[in-house]
């Protein structure tokens, strides 16, 4: 199956570390199994939230290979890099290891429409036109704004562009615009999976997105939301989503989001330690208590959140 | 009462326009009455969400005067401007009209700690040391980052700084740090009212904030949340807050937030038209249907949202 | 004569202040006369370097009117503002006072091609289609990047766009591209006057620019450079330009450039005081000595710089 | 000799490529010899202008090793990276290969004073406290502004910080402030070498800088300027500097500067090709003619520029 028809939930995987800073391979495996059991239809490694820049080249490749070998679903590898040489070498190595595709975010120096579309034309050439890639559209972090027209141009310029990781904010109209391009025949179909921590997943699905690509600490809930949407059970979908929204919102805070995510995954028994490599943000005792409180409240609705 | 002891909800007032673009004075009055009935303890006019830059000097002053004359609570006037001359003239005129204080946001060119604290020292001098001012801390929009230490320096440098409009994100630790400064005696007490559309109001109150300064379309709910918190009814507070969170989150989308807010205030009968002056963002039919759907869902919990 | 055919030097006028901060009208007049005697073909008031944001509305208009009344050349008034209301009111008042046109810079929030061209379409409508306007393209300060194609779209969308204040950096290819559009018939002719403190004026003229719009403290030299270029005396033009380049470069330093400019204009007897309104940057004694040294060196080549 | 006492000219080395994109080792060697003959007292490889992000890890290390082996002067290796893992591995490998130190630029996300000083404390720990490092201060490119006080804190926090690559703009007062700190005993001595393409080298030396760290295409001139300054021959120093200023200014244009530099080095016979790896900017025929014209004019004063 091509990534361009992907649906469901591609979980953005964090990179588990031991308390001494080494990669925790046992947790990598357990986490991979957990994502599969949670209903993930894909896994994305080495994304922004995977602490990729804190890994050196061989560590990064090791993590990617380990997840790819174990997973029974497509794995996407983040290969964003300040230059095309490193991007190419990680992309080629990932594909050789069995990745389904790679993900590329734009450098924050791009401004004009031409600069943006030109960058992706060069990137697609650098990694090789045989490598399927996911276009990451995340203005809040990258300061690069792509109109629907620019995304269309990138898709049409580059046959190897197969998916959009959509996390513009606000972004609902962008999904509608892109699906409109597909309907009017001016853009071929691509998969649209949504990030932003899942904060707008409910309406993103209703606007035509195929699912989520995010690392919210309850991927099982995300999978259920996508399923309920597919079954046309609108109120049930929103009820489940809304029960998690207070925690989704809390996890969505830039800077401490990853700490929340790792803490909950640790509490859920998925990873052994919440350790991050430096530079790292720690949860304060107050923040930890807030997360515990939120878990308890979510647990009243969704038994999965009723942790020990 | 000094603004430095203010608590509760200072509503950020939008500026109502007629469909032909003129200021709608009838709606200004009705909106002012509505805010008072909703339990507002203050009103802030000419803020970011008040379309202040779209008003010329005399229009701006008219709106401020009109609200001040009618309101029985303190009114804060936004006076941020690209230069001190315009800032001073609006600040002096507002105080003469009866404002309780003014609000100042930093220009987006400031970077270093010294630049930030220096700016507010000059601004305080420019408007006059007799004018109480609210410090607006909103990095997401203004790109100016103030550490707790810088805020303390501004507070201690400027006796006329009486309140923080807190909308850093993430910002919970900042509230804790500032209240810690007060406890250890290194900073005098100021009022902390929180913005960000109310998205974190539940925990902001628990960290020590005095309330909200935001324009979420249900200020009555915000007032109830602050009240429930004051009464120590934690679960009831979170239950009410969480029921509104899907809509709060929707309204929090940069760019279209004001359109959502005006649309709901119009549906609630508070203002006559959702018109904005240009440049303006319109709600698409899909977005309007989403807001209607959210109102209906909120209405199941909170009767106020069950609009006709 | 329409501004679209303007050539030569439009001097960016600083606003002279007395030491007590009031506008120095005597210096405004003397400065206006000086610019005319120096060979200016136009004057631009209330630009970035005119400390416009430090003037309130009536002061700004007074300065504009005073220069317009006295000048025998076209006067352009900077009307950039955070909102269209203030922009419109200053633009209309300026035109009534006899201005030849206005100048508009883009707000720094614009990113995509559509946002940029859309902004100028709305601005042109806001000020009225009968008001000729100068498009200011200054990415270094405004963080807004316009491709030649976007500039063409703005020119073709808006018949009232008559001139480009060109200060992209690097920008020589942009001039060539725009003149190419004129030759291939895809863009009507506009005047291109160059800013950036004159730092690239030598080659900008050779690429097709019509002259300078900048406030370098020797506008008489700028006028001679344009004249020598027009006479085809290439080496003489570069010799004169290069003699001034060390000082041009020094004045081009962001932040202290205006202090240098006012200091030299004061030393040349054009304005009475180098005072700026706050926030202001002062020349240190070391910096003043450096400027004196540069003036002395320029003076060996160009007698005008041999000040008392 | 420690880098903290370095003086003279550390040339920022470009990375020479063959037309097919491979690193041109023959040119690397010839270029190294040329820099030594030109009077370089040090060489910096893998800087911003060394196209470092376009090299993969092993290529980068090869270039560094090759220059280190051949050079008889200290070599500094740029190790800025989006994460500490890659920074550490390149830094350790460079030191093992014989580098004198490494250079670190701040990531563009840093804003507050604490964030900046905290970053360098973590970076110094990450690479190891035994690795001397150069602090790069380049706000125009990195958007990170460091006050003199923050630089002092970094120097005093980190004994391994031995040099400042100074390229703030304007930056003359910063040099004076830092030298003042040394005189008042609040900061230990570090070497200050100046970048910015050399555009202010004349006055930077007079303010107390120890020399230049830049890749201007006539490093021999830079060395002579430093020497003339050391000999107290002020006018001769400025005469030489000013003769090159038109070309220095031209080369200083962001984006095309490297193309100008490589073109002139090719014309001088130092490197075989002006090829850059993508993304690359090409000189247009018009730009090439402008550089040729500037070389011819410089050549009237400085015989070195009178190329064949």
Image: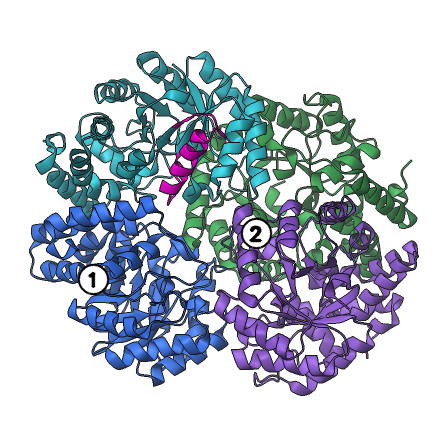
Chain colours: A blue, B cyan, C green, D purple
Magenta segment boundaries in residue numbering: B166-191
* Residue D245 figure quarter: bottom right
**Quarter of the image that includes the C terminus of chain D:** bottom right
Place of residue A258 in the rendered image (x, y in percent of width and height, measured from the top left): 34, 57
Q: Which residue occupies 56% across, 77% down?
A: D277
Q: Are marks 2 and 1 on the same chain?
A: no
> For the residue labelled by badge 2, is the local secondary structure a helix, a strand or a loop?
helix
Pointers 2 and 1 in contact (C-beta within 8 Å): no
| Relative height, residue B241 to residue C273 (above, below) | below
Q: Nearer the viewer, residue D214 or A161?
A: D214
Name the residue beneath numbered marker 1: A219
- A226 vs C42, left or right, is left
Q: Nearer the viewer, residue C17 or C156?
A: C17
Q: Is residue D76 magenta?
A: no
Q: Which residue occupies 26% across, 48% down?
A: A291
| Relative height, residue A252 to residue C278 (above, below) | below
Place of residue A130 in the rendered image (x, y in percent of width and height, measured from the top left): 35, 82
**Quarter of the image that includes the N terminus of chain D:** bottom right
Q: Which residue occupies 55% across, 19% down?
A: B128
Which residue is farthest bottom?
A: D26
Q: Select label 2 or label 1 by which is in front.
A: 2
Bin the neighbour count of mark 1 within 10 Å (Cα to Cα): few under 14, some 14-19, many 20 and up: many
* Residue B119 figure quarter: top right
Name the residue beneath numbered marker 2: D117
Place of residue D192 in the rendered image (x, y in percent of width and height, measured from the top left): 73, 57
- A164 vs A226, left or right, is right
- C127 vs D201, left or right, is left
Q: Nearer the viewer, residue D150 or D48?
A: D150
């Amino acid at each position: 199956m091509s990534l361009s028809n992907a649906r469901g939930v591609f979980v953005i995987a964090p990179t588990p570390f031991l308390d001494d800073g080494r990669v925790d391979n046992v947790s990598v495996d357990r986490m991979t199994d957990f994502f599969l059991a949670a209903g993930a239809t894909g896994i994305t490694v080495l994304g922004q939230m995977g602490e990729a820049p804190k890994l050196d080249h061989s560590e990064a490749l090791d993590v990617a290979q380990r997840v790819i070998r174990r997973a029974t679903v497509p794995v996407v590898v983040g290969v964003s890099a300040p230059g095309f040489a490193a991007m190419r070498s990680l992309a080629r190595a990932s594909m050789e290891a069995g990745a389904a595709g790679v993900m590329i975010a734009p450098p924050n120096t791009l401004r004009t429409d031409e600069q943006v579309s030109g960058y992706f034309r060069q990137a697609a050439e650098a990694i090789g036109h045989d490598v399927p890639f996911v276009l990451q559209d995340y203005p809040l972090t990258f300061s690069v704004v792509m109109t629907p027209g620019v995304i269309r141009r990138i898709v049409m310029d580059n046959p190897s562009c197969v998916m959009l990781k959509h996390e513009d904010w606000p972004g609902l109209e962008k999904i509608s615009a892109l699906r409109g391009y597909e309907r009017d025949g001016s853009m071929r179909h691509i998969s649209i999976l949504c990030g932003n921590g899942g904060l707008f997943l409910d309406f993103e699905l209703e606007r035509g997105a195929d699912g989520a690509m995010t690392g919210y600490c309850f991927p099982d809930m995300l999978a259920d939301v996508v399923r309920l949407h597919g079954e046309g059970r609108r109120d049930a979908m929103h009820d489940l989503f809304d029960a998690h929204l207070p925690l989704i919102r809390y996890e969505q805070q830039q800077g401490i989001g990853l700490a929340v995510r790792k803490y909950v995954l640790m509490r859920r028994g998925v990873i052994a330690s919440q350790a991050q490599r430096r530079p790292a943000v720690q949860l304060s005792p107050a923040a930890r208590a807030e997360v515990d409180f939120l878990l308890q409240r979510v647990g009243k609705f969704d038994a999965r959140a009723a942790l020990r």
